[in-house]
């Protein structure tokens, strides 16, 4: 079987999470969703009543929060200070605030350390995020950067959320652009492909085709 680390980075709405989970299942690998960790940190910030743009206060809250995530592809376990937040992290309130929280360098340092130690003991792992190939695991076996045209990403997100109203789809597209812009332009660990990443454009590929491609790359490299 596969032994090694697969990194899967890219913007939102590319189908990255469902691809990453399916690849992990196919490879018999562990799975780490680092976005869930930034989202959990954001729950802690919101619950503390702190302004997500107040970097100092955000750093203080996140330093004191216990963030736990599972590493199985089949289930999603996410806890903050022992409370189950797996559903809450997908809500609009968290989605709005997460880019600001994740731009704080102290937050990134803390979560990157935790990500490395979670990955450390696994023989085989798929790690999903924005900076995994560039910062978290620069020595990974295979690095994939998953992209898709913005319209395709907004459509996919709309389908996921059961939204069909054109105005709401347009609002989703605007939110995706806002987050991409924020994530790509931040000073600390901006969203970008690693120099040695394979860029996969999923605009015209279905999920199975993307999964096959990533599994193929992983098995060829192992
Ligand atoms: O992947 P997901 O949409 O859950 O990520 C939520 C947010 O967390 C991203 O928009 C980004 O701001 C942040 N993030 C990050 N670095 C990662 C993973 C996620 O900054 N490795």
Image: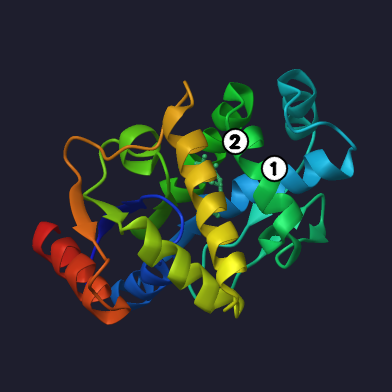
Going by the image, does 39 lie left or right of 64?
Answer: left
Residues 148 and 126: in front is 148
Going by the image, does 19 lie left or right of 154?
Answer: left
Residues 164 and 202: in front is 164
| Image quarter of residue 217 | bottom left
From the image, which quarter does the C terminus lie in? bottom left
Residue 150: image location, x then y, percent = 38, 56
Quote the CA–CA distance across marks 1 and 2: 9 Å
Residue 135: image location, x then y, percent = 37, 32
| Residue 32 visible, this orientation | yes
Q: How busy is the neighbourhood of tag 2: few (under 14 within 10 Å), some, or many (20 plus)?
A: many
Q: Residue at x 56, y 31 (%)?
A: 108
- As drawn, the residue found furthest toward the left would be 220
- Counting residues from the N terminus, which is met first, the one under dot 1 or under dot 2? 1
Q: Is mark 2 within 8 Å of ligand 1?
A: yes
| Image quarter of residue 25 | bottom left
Residue 87: image location, x then y, percent = 72, 68
Q: Residue at x 55, y 67 (%)?
A: 169
Q: How busy is the neighbourhood of tag 1: few (under 14 within 10 Å), some, or many (20 plus)?
A: some
Q: Which residue is mark 2?
A: 102
| Residue 16 visible, this orientation | no
Q: How many marks?
A: 2
Q: Is residue 133 above or below residue 135?
A: below
Q: Which residue is mark 1?
A: 97
Number of the front mark, 1 or 2 = 1
From the image, which quarter does the N terminus lie in? bottom left
What SS does tag 1 mark? helix
Q: Is residue 38 above or below residue 112?
A: below
Going by the image, does 214 lie left or right of 44?
Answer: left
């Amino acid at each position: 079987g596969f032994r090694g680390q697969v990194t899967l980075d890219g913007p939102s709405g590319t189908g990255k999470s469902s691809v990453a989970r399916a690849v992990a299942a196919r490879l018999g690998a562990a799975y780490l969703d680092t976005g869930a960790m930034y989202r959990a940190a954001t729950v802690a910030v919101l619950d503390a009543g702190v302004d997500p743009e107040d970097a100092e206060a955000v750093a203080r809250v996140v330093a004191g929060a216990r963030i736990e995530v599972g590493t199985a592809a089949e289930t999603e376990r996410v806890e903050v200070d022992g409370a189950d937040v797996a559903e809450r992290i997908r809500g609009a309130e968290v989605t709005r605030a997460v880019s600001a929280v994740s731009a704080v360098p102290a937050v990134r340092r803390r979560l990157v350390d935790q990500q490395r130690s979670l990955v450390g003991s696994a023989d085989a792992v798929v790690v999903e995020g924005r900076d995994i190939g560039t910062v978290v695991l620069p020595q990974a076996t295979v690095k994939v950067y998953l992209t898709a045209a913005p319209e395709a990403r907004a459509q996919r997100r709309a389908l996921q959320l059961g939204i069909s109203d054109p105005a709401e789809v347009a609002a989703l597209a605007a939110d995706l652009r806002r987050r991409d812009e924020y994530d790509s332009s931040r000073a600390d660990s901006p969203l970008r492909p690693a120099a040695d990443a394979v860029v996969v454009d999923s605009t015209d590929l279905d999920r199975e085709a993307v999964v096959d491609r990533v599994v193929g790359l992983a098995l060829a490299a192992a």
